[in-house]
Amino acid sequence: MAPVTASRRDTPVTVLTATAAFGVLLGWATYALHGTTPLLERATNSSSTWIIWTAAAGALIRARSLAVWGGALMMLATCGGYYAASALGGTFGSGGLGTAVVWSVAGLVGGPLLGWAGWTVRRGRGDLRAVAGAVITMVVLGEGLWLGLGLHYWGEAVVYLTVGVLLTGLLTVYLVRTGVHRYWLCPVLALVGGLAFYLAEKGILNGLLGSA
């Protein structure tokens, strides 16, 4: 009986439905927590938050291909949940559609990569697991750099950079304990990737959002 139950829980329809539902709830919560406290607002209204949860979803999914599809679906569902809540709350302005399109496209590009990264860190093999770990943590470091260097919110930037360093350290320890030989690739690539993410957010994404 247990194997049958487990197999039903792992069916593509069940996995993708659960992933989409969680994404909608995450997007809705992001909007709902606006204006509560500065810490909660920043913690939810953040690309890092959406990205970390997408990678976590990929780590929980057994099949690699399903984790990739789940990553894309979760990102789209999160955007959908956020902008649906915004529309119902009466704050979906004239530029809302363009912004929603930009974030949805970004989710379609980044979601599969993050789903794969979460899956690879937990279930992959070889040094690629260290690279996948860096893909996840570089976003937190990059957003910390953007908050500090780009927006001059240094208090929040320090929090993000601290969390990024701690998360990188925890993943590196996990990789060491599970036998990854070139575990050092995770912190090194996370630092390099964090800088690249900051430059991309400053240039490409910021330009797209400004013109949307």
Image (tube, rainbow, N blue to C red):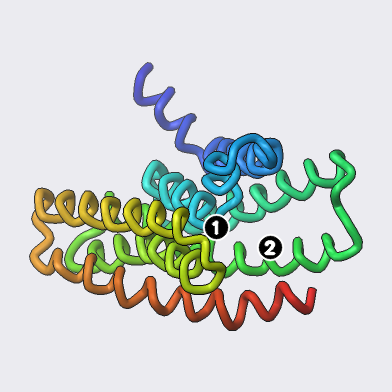
Q: Which residue is mark 1?
A: 47
> Tag 1's secondary structure?
helix
Quadrant of the image containing the N terminus: top left
Residue 106 location (% of width, % of height)? 62, 68
Residue type at tag 2: Ser
In screen coordinates, is 66 left or right of 132? Answer: right
In screen coordinates, is 55 left or right of 78? Answer: left
Q: Is residue 30 above or below residue 107?
A: above
Residue 183 location (% of width, % of height)? 14, 64
For the point 39% across and 76% down, the residue is: 195
Q: Earlier in the sequence, mark 2 or mark 1?
A: 1
Quadrant of the image containing the C terminus: bottom right
Q: Is there any visible trace of residue 28 in the rendered image? A: no
Q: Residues within 10 Å of mark 1 (few under 14, many from 20)?
A: some
**Image disc number at residue 104:** 2
Residue 80 location (% of width, % of height)? 73, 49
For the point 66% across and 55% down, the residue is: 76
For the point 86% across and 46% down, the residue is: 87
Residue 34 location (% of width, % of height)? 68, 41
Q: Is there any visible trace of residue 84 in the rendered image? A: yes
What separation in Å lies between label 2 and label 1 (alpha carbons)? 12 Å
Q: Nearer the viewer, mark 2 or mark 1?
A: 1
Residue type at tag 1: Ser
Q: Nearer the viewer, residue 93 or 112?
A: 93
For the point 46% across and 74% down, the residue is: 197
Q: Nearer the viewer, residue 17 or 56?
A: 56
**Image disc number at residue 123:** none
